Amino acid sequence: MSIKIITCKKSRIDKVDFQNLSFGKEFSDHIFITEFDGKNWVNKRIQPFEAIPLNITLSALHYGQSIFEGLKAFRDINNQIQIFRPKDNFIRMNKSANRMCMQEIPEDIFFSGLVELCKIDNKWISNIQGNSYYLRPLMFAIDDSFGVHASENYVFAIIGCAVGAYYSKNLKLKVETEFSRACIGGTGFAKTAGNYAASLLATKKANKEGYDQILWTDVIEHKYIEELGSSNIFLLYENKLITPNLRGTVLDGITRDSVIKLAITFGYSVEERVISIDEIIQLHTSNKLIEIFATGTAASVISIKELSYYGHSINLEIKENNLASKLKNKLEEIKLSKTDDIFNWNFHVKI
Ligand code: PMP
């Protein structure tokens, strides 16, 4: 595939403090971008990270056809660049595209974009503990006329970003019982912009009340747990790890899947099923609940220290060597090639 390379005049990398990276602010020097003109993906290119001219009428702004992905590249202990499970993000992106009635992205374009961006901006992929290079593929509709219909024209782009840790502490969650995120038959399983916009008010309210995040529940009874704003959730009791099953209302998290597979190799039994708040309270009251943790590309694996339901708080003691930290460490060892990649999750980018 031919990709035009337009390099930036001056790198911004010298201005970046890699020892103190926050999440989502330090965009690397270039992006990958291509347009779908109704027939073909054209003008595939790497270009400088800068403002791009867009029409105020573009349909993504009005009718919401906009999807994205999030994945990470790492510099491993052998100084090689590894992207974690990109094929899964590619598959999920096209599931989102189908749900939102958008053009699918071909696999070779998705992968060439990732590879070329990692190659040209490889200096942004640091080997400092906890750092990584977050890759954000996105697609949005650019038809420039009014009227609700599926767009014929799209932009697909990939942005890269040097990032540090997403959360710096264990989380305090509010079980959401007023607002709803996704219903069966809706768009909950798609990584589409509107899902996130719809979550903001509830999250803002919870933040004001002192919570870090929301735990969404089902839309009908607000009794069955679903997921957090940008991560999936797991509970551990006895030797059992449980997580809400995929009913079309939660995102099919790639970290979720990795954690399920790793936990099985650790000897845990894993169940994907309906989990009610009542069950969680019961497990906690009978001293059976050991851990709750969240999983996601940005957050990796993070422990939950408190869960609040109508003001009733479940407090959990976070032990040093708990399952969440074992899973997080194992995942990191795989991403950094410190241990065997038994599931073949790493995709090596040759520089
Ligand atoms: N749920 C939502 C709503 C998310 O945005 C994310 C982040 N992509 C996740 C779960 C976790 O998915 P993953 O492990 O693939 O990052």
Image (cartoon, grey):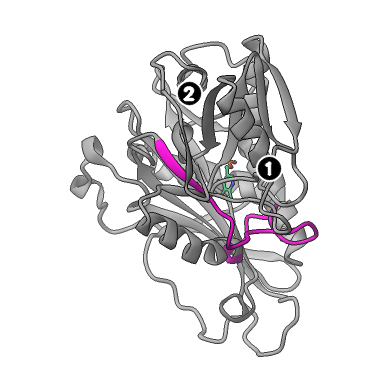
- On whether ligand 1 comes within 8 Å of the CB at mark 2, the answer is no
Give the residue pinned by disc 1: 252
Q: Nearer the viewer, residue 249 or 216?
A: 216
Amino acid type, mark 1 = Asp
Amino acid type, mark 2 = Lys
x and y percentages locating residue 294 in the rendered image: 53, 35
- Residue 39 lies left or right of residue 343; in this view the side is right
Q: Quadrant of residue 198?
A: bottom right
Magenta-span inclusion, residue 188: yes
- On whether ligand 1 comes within 8 Å of the CB at mark 1, the answer is yes
* Residues rendered magenta in the picture: 171-194
Q: Nearer the viewer, residue 193 or 132?
A: 193
x and y percentages locating residue 159 in the rendered image: 46, 54
Residue 177 versus residue 148 in the image, above or below:
above
Give the residue pinned by disc 2: 328
Q: Which residue corresponds to the image point at 71% horizontal and 76% vertical from the top-left?
A: 151
x and y percentages locating residue 39 in the rendered image: 76, 70
Q: Is residue 85 visible?
A: no
Q: Quadrant of residue 288?
A: top right
Q: Which residue corresponds to the image point at 37% horizontal and 51% vertical from the top-left?
A: 24
Residue 348's disc is none
- Residue 291 lies left or right of residue 210; in this view the side is right
Q: Which residue corresponds to the image point at 43% horizontal and 62% vertical from the top-left?
A: 205
x and y percentages locating residue 320 in the rendered image: 38, 16
Magenta-span inclusion, residue 94: no
